[in-house]
Image (spheres, helix red, strand yellow):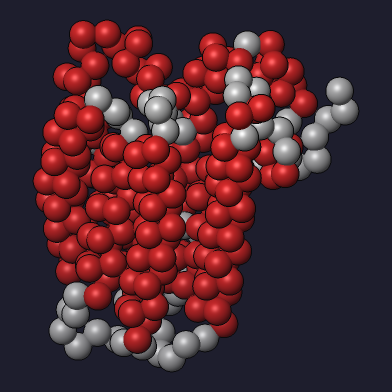
Amino acid sequence: MISILLLALGVLAAMLVIMGVGWFVQRAAHNGGWTDVFWTFGTGATLSAAALIPLGAEPGFPWRRVFVAAMVVIWSLRLGLYIARRVAKSPEEDARYAAFRRDWGADFQKRMVGLMLVQAPVSALLSLSPLLAARTPRAGIGVQDVVGVIIFAGALWGEGIADGQMHAFRANPANRGKVCDTGLWSWSRHPNYFFEAAIWIAYPVIALDLAHPFTWLSLIAPVIMFLTVRFASGVPPLEEAMLKSRGDAYLAYQKRVSVFIPRPPKRA
């Protein structure tokens, strides 16, 4: 367990550097959206590398480190490339960062330093789940591993569908200024965030071993991710920005559609 904590500290150090570089990039580009690009690719690179690092004669199945690292890389590439394309091609800054820029005024870049660097310890805490999954003291590939991969694949697919539907909606000029309420977005106002949080459930499913209490620490990633996207940097600032830009249309959307967990919409 001490070795895993040391690896998490390594993730913290690397992410502080990565997010520091990211601050200069978003400042030069005048687009806070690059924050998410650096965090996603940086977290994917550091967590997958940490998962692969051998720690002596470890118990369990050695190839588990490989497929857990592969899960992290797949997640990072899919999400990171989607965000990078959106940030690079969109003429407008992400609604959350545009709201921060407007509200913070002249202090925007100073406050962005803290906003970006605080994401490094978040990555370090998230790393505990894949690190424990990669090194769970269980021999051979078993049911837990299969179930974990199924959860991961299903949530990744759901997030990809949600992102694809939003991309198609925004690409249609006729939808400019409108609220996307089709497909998964008619069941949840933030289906992408829901599936993003669900992805991280896969790691404790793989990691948990009742005979080894420390594996319960693997639950930290889905808990942190849920709290972050639902109550911190995800849903709240985006909801506020959408209310300001879409007004009554978004207010009606809020009354009709679930905020997070997908479920059938209420009738108008």
Camera-side residue of 185 and 11? 185
View extreme (front): residue = 173
Residue drawn at x 19%, y 27% is: 27
- Quarter that holds the N terminus: bottom left
- Expressed as whole percent of the image width and height from the top left, the position of residue 29 reads 23, 30
- Expressed as whole percent of the image width and height from the top left, the position of residue 18 reads 16, 47
- Expressed as whole percent of the image width and height from the top left, the position of residue 79 reads 43, 52
Q: In this rendering, would 242 be left or right of 120? A: right
Q: In this rendering, would 22 be left or right of 67? A: left
Quadrant for residue 155, please give it.
Answer: bottom right
Residue drawn at x 46%, y 33% is: 234
The answer to whether residue 195 shows anywhere in this view is no
Q: In this rendering, would 233 be left or right of 191? A: left
- Quarter that holds the C terminus: top right
Above or below: residue 21 compared with residue 63: above
Residue drawn at x 29%, y 28% is: 31
- Expressed as whole percent of the image width and height from the top left, the position of residue 121 reads 24, 44
Camera-side residue of 73 and 261? 73
Above or below: residue 95 compared with residue 218: above
Residue drawn at x 32%, y 16% is: 101
Quadrant for residue 128, please give it.
Answer: bottom left
